[in-house]
Image (cartoon, grey):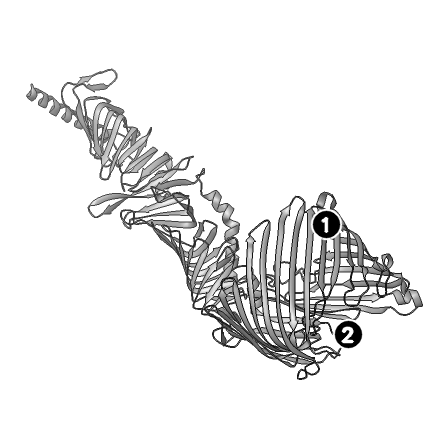
Amino acid sequence: MRVRRSVLASVTAFLLAWGLGQEAGAGPSQGQPERPFAGLVIVSHGRQTIDLVTGLTVLPDGGSLVDRHTGVEVDAQVIRYVDGDYIEAAGVTVSGAFGEVVADALRIDVENSLLIATGELRLSRDGLVVTAASLSYHALEQVVVFDGGVTGTEPAFFADRLLLDTLTGDVLLDGRYEFAGDLFTMRSPAAGGRLQLSLRQSGDEIVYAATTEVSPALLERFRAYL
Amino acid sequence: MTRRVHRALAALAVLTAAGWAAAQCSPGPETSQVTIPNYLAVYYLHFVSLPELDEVRFYGGVCVTAVGGEWTVIADEVVVTGLSGDLGLRAASPELFWGQLRMSAEHLAATTETLALQEATVIAPDFSGDAETIVLDLVSGGMTLTGFTLAGQAFAVSGQRAELMGETLTVSGPSVTTCIGLEEAPYAIEGVSATVDLTTRTVDLRGGALRVGALRIGLRPRIELSEESLEAFTLPVRVQNVDDRGDPSRPGSGIGVRVVGVPIDGEGAASLDVGATGIDQPHPLGLVALVRLAATQGQQRASATFGLEAGLPLLDVQVTRSLAPWLDATLALHSGAEQEGTPYHEGRLGLAARSRDLLPGPPSLSLSADAFAAATALTSLDDLARPQVFGTRVGAGVEASAGTGRTAAGTLSVRVRAQATLYPNHGAVQWGVRLNPSWRYEAAPLTLSLSHDAWLTNAASPFAGLDRLQPRARTSGSLRLEGELARWEGERTLSGYVAARATHDALPVNGEATGVTSAVGEAGLTYDTGTWELEAGVSAQLAGVLDPAEGRDAYVAYTAEARLPGWPVLQEEGTAGPVVPEGAFAVRTEAVQGLVPEDPGLRRLEMSVAVPLAWENVELRPGIGFDFAPLILGGEAPVLSLHALDLTVVTCCGSLTVGYANQRGRLSASFAIDIERRPPRR
């Protein structure tokens, strides 16, 4: 049975890679850099059903996705996708430049290069552990936006929203926030504010330098999401 | 402007900013707060953490308050240091509020136990100043200052180092001067150490010396300076006008000026009075040069004065020994005349016993007794060497005083004295008994008083002018009713008074006839508009009408006066505000009408005017008056009846006023110091 599943998975991966390669070769993006999530490799862990009318493919035994452009890898318990349109997954573990995320659900909007994770969401990366209600990974800009009450344990903080620059590791807390230092806890003004957390290497440790005066470069970087 | 003036202005700015500071020390729409448990709370606009430096920097307007509120720091930027170790704080150009003190500085550094300020300015309700460093001990509440100057209204204290605990400042290397705001005071009282009571504003200075320019004069080992004593201490000049008693050639009479208490030793036990008497015509000019010595050793006190008084030799030596807590023995030698005194030569041994406060009261009762033996030669100012009366004197006396204290029925007191003196060389005995009851009742707006002074004596002393008693039976009474009559909006008030006082001598005094020697009735109104003060009054001396006697006068005087304080203002530019004179523009009219047959009718109709003229460092107050009675009565020209001039020089050390007044031939001089007056700020 296990041999049979491995054979099926290999065949599916071959077919997907071939199909996407055909599409890429014939599509409008020919000659242009490949878009994030446009070059996904999906490997089924078991059964696979395809609705030939809608193009919806379901992997009820789960599977994994790999985006060779962004380096995002998703391991899910259930995967549903329409080729070239979207991918939905449940019980996911996502890893990429932004760290490793565990979430109840995930949706990748292929057209907009957007990855959204929701439900019991937890992100871990060097020096940063965050839980939130939802995560949006804007793959083109390489920006992650956490929403719906964001709580960090490394470092300890709470914020209405958190924006993460996956290129630099810099973080912006937005809205009402609390940031706990070793001695005291910084709280936003009553009307809310912004706190920049800049990634620093201190010996073997990764620490964040906090500042309420957000650098213009970071504001520009996050301008579309504020 | 000097650096200190700059600092004083900066300090004023701190005061102005106090309200803003209070507002900044609370969370707001754009202000955040963090608390470091058991240390401080920070209100800030922005912050940045610097993990590599173990610091957090708050900026954009920061208020830091101690948990408990003992102190507050306001600064543009505050850095909290030692986050993972020894906590600290530092700030540039902070303002620190600590109790009633407000301080600003170039730099602040703090730990959990101390706050240290560099190049600081301090402002308190009663004083302000600056210091090179100020360190506040947050544990003990003490303050240590170095290189500091603190100035009150009247004087400034500076020193190398001082410790403030509560309201007491202990200073090393103190310097006290009334010259405020000068880099180098022209004079100062310097010492080894001093204790300053900031509540009473007194300085207890040890090892002191007076420095005037480069000259240093040693003072007593320990002196106490206050606003009052400093005024007398700094310029110990006395101006007097001594009545010549009808004899213009009398030595010591007329206008005199003397500088008193000039120290002439390092211990302060010896001093010198120098000056001159009779500097006005036609009184004789006399030199004053008196050395005064004083010493105390155990139960023994000694004092001596010798030199020249009004050009005549004077010696006075007294040694007093306490034989018991209630008994003193005094040995005294005297030769010459004190100022305005009777000249005599004498050797004297005396005992004085006191038993005060037998009833500490109220009611109160005290007793005292004295006895003496003396050899005395009474002489005259014309020839001190030739005694007019010579002989021995032996005397004793007892005295008792009792009082009810203030009661609902007023205050009643009684003084009784009995004394007797034997003059063996003259075969005479003088005795005297005095009874002096008095009563006073005060219940605003009414004040009543009544007293009787009776001396029963045989007036048998051969030493007239020295100890001869004079029989007396004088009764005096007074009544005064005064208060505010009306008050309107804009601080306009009308007040008035009615008063009467009378004296009756049942026995002749100094050759005057018995009877009603004085009976005065008077009334007056004052209308204050808030700018103008208008006064009108009438005063009648009726003794010569009620009980006519030779030389007893009776007259009515009418007065009207208008005053405008602080006018005119001559200088409005060059200073922080207009230079307002402290004197008042005044116009006064006085008419005196005689009521006795010897001198009836209009005696005087005087009109006078005074104008204060003030500039930054000088104020002149000239006054002039003319008597128009000769014009009305005989068609003669008005007579210059009054002329006066006060000159005030205002310096950074205080103000000095000298002046004279000639009122109908009576010449007087004035000399005054105001150590709180300073030139207006520029």
- Where in the figure is residue A99, as x and y percent of width and height? 22, 35
Which residue in the rendered view is the most extreme toward the right? Answer: B634
Residue depicted at 66% across the width and 49% down the height? B411
Image quadrant where residue B356 sits: bottom right
Examine the rendering and report whether any part of residue B669 can be seen. yes
Q: Depth check: B492 or B409 in front?
A: B409
Mark 2: few, some, or many residues within 10 Å (few <14, many ≥20)?
A: few
Q: Depth check: A61 or B425 in front?
A: B425
Please say if A19 is above or below B471: above
Q: Secondary structure at mark 1?
A: strand
* Image disc number at residue B404: none
User: Residue B585 vs residue A179: left or right?
Assistant: right
Q: Depth check: A47 or B25 in front?
A: B25
Q: Secondary structure at mark 2?
A: loop
Please say if B347 is above or below B112: below
Q: Marks 1 and 2, how far apart in space? A: 36 Å
Examine the rendering and report whether any part of residue B275 can be seen. no
Please say if B494 is above or below A94: below
| Chain of the residue under the numbered disc 1 shown in the image | B
Q: Depth check: B14 or B147 in front?
A: B147
Q: Read off the residue under disc 1.
A: B448
Residue depicted at 37% across the width and 50% down the height? B138
Which residue in the rendered view is the most extreme toward the front? Answer: B427
Image quadrant where residue A106 sits: top left
User: Do the dots labelled 1 and 2 sit on one chain?
Assistant: yes
Task: Check the picture and name the quadrant holding the N terminus of chain B.
Answer: bottom right
Task: Check the picture and name the quadrant holding the C terminus of chain B.
Answer: bottom right
| Chain of the residue under the numbered disc 2 shown in the image | B
* Image disc number at residue B246: 2
Residue type indicated by callout 1: Leu
